[in-house]
Amino acid sequence: MIAYAERSDEPMPQVALVAAGIDYQRPVLVRIHSECMTGDIFGSLKCDCGAQLQAALSQIIKEKGILLYLRQEGRGIGLINKLKAYRLQEKGLNTLDANTHLGFEADSRQYQCAIEMLLDLGVQQIRLLTNNPDKVAVFEGSPVELVERVPLVIPAEKESAAYLQAKKELMGHLL
C-alpha cells in the first residue's frame, strides 16, 4: 500500500494497492476505484461499487496488478451530499439528476492523479479494468498507454437495477 497526497498531513490520501510480483515490462492490470463508503464498506445494494471492488481485487491479485483507490466519494460530492442524493433518489430522481439537483455536476470526479500515481509507480502500459468511458478517455494522449479496456460487469441486484440503467443510458457505461 502506497499513500499519495499533496501534503504530508493529508488525512485522506489516495491509495495504491500494488500486488507483489508485478512485471512492469508488460501491460499492468489497473483498476481506478472511487471511494464508496456505503458500497465498499457497508455492502449497500443501491450501487455495484462494493461488488466491483471485490471482483477487481480478486482479479488484481490473480493477475498481479494495481488498485488505485481514489478518495472521491459520491462521484466527487462527498458522503454527506451523497446521502442527500440518496434521499432524492428515494423520491424518484436518478443518480445523476439527484447530484445536479443538489447543485453539483452529474460526475465531479477527476482522474489526473491516477496517471501521476501510475507514473510514480513506473507503469508505462495498462490494461484498465473499467466500464466507464470517462476513465478510458483520461489516458488519451497521456504518458501512460492504455492497451486494453477490461470489462468489470457485476450482475444487477433488484435494488441497483435503476442505478445501473442510469449509468448505462446517461453516462455511457459499457455494461
Image (tube, rainbow, N blue to C red):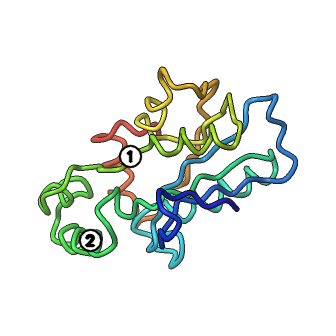
In depth, the one of 77 and 53 nearer the eye is 77
Helix, strand or loop at mark 1: loop
Helix, strand or loop at mark 2: helix
Q: Position of residue 38 (x, y in %)?
A: 44, 74
Residue 156 seen in the current view? no
Q: Does label 1 or label 2 sit earlier along the sequence?
A: 2
- Answer left or right for 55 relative to 170: right
In depth, the one of 36 and 153 nearer the eye is 36
Residue 47 seen in the current view? yes
Determine the image quadrant of residue 158: bottom left
Q: Position of residue 144 (x, y in %)?
A: 60, 28
Q: Residues within 10 Å of mark 1 (few under 14, many from 20)?
A: some
Determine the image quadrant of residue 90: bottom left
Residue type, numbered disc 1: Gln
The residue under the point 27% across, 41% down is: 170
- Answer left or right for 86 relative to 163: left
**Residue positioned most to the bottom:** 42
The residue under the point 39% across, 64% down is: 73
Q: Position of residue 169 (x, y in %)?
A: 30, 40
- Answer left or right for 157 relative to 110: right
Q: Residues within 10 Å of mark 2 (few under 14, many from 20)?
A: some
According to the picture, the residue beneath numbered tag 2 turns out to be 86
According to the picture, the residue beneath numbered tag 1 turns out to be 110
In depth, the one of 22 and 53 nearer the eye is 22
Residue type, numbered disc 2: Tyr
Find the distance from the CA under tag 1 to the CA under tag 2.
22 Å
Q: Nearer the viewer, mark 1 or mark 2?
A: 1
Q: Look at the image and tell me in which quarter the N terminus lies.
A: bottom right
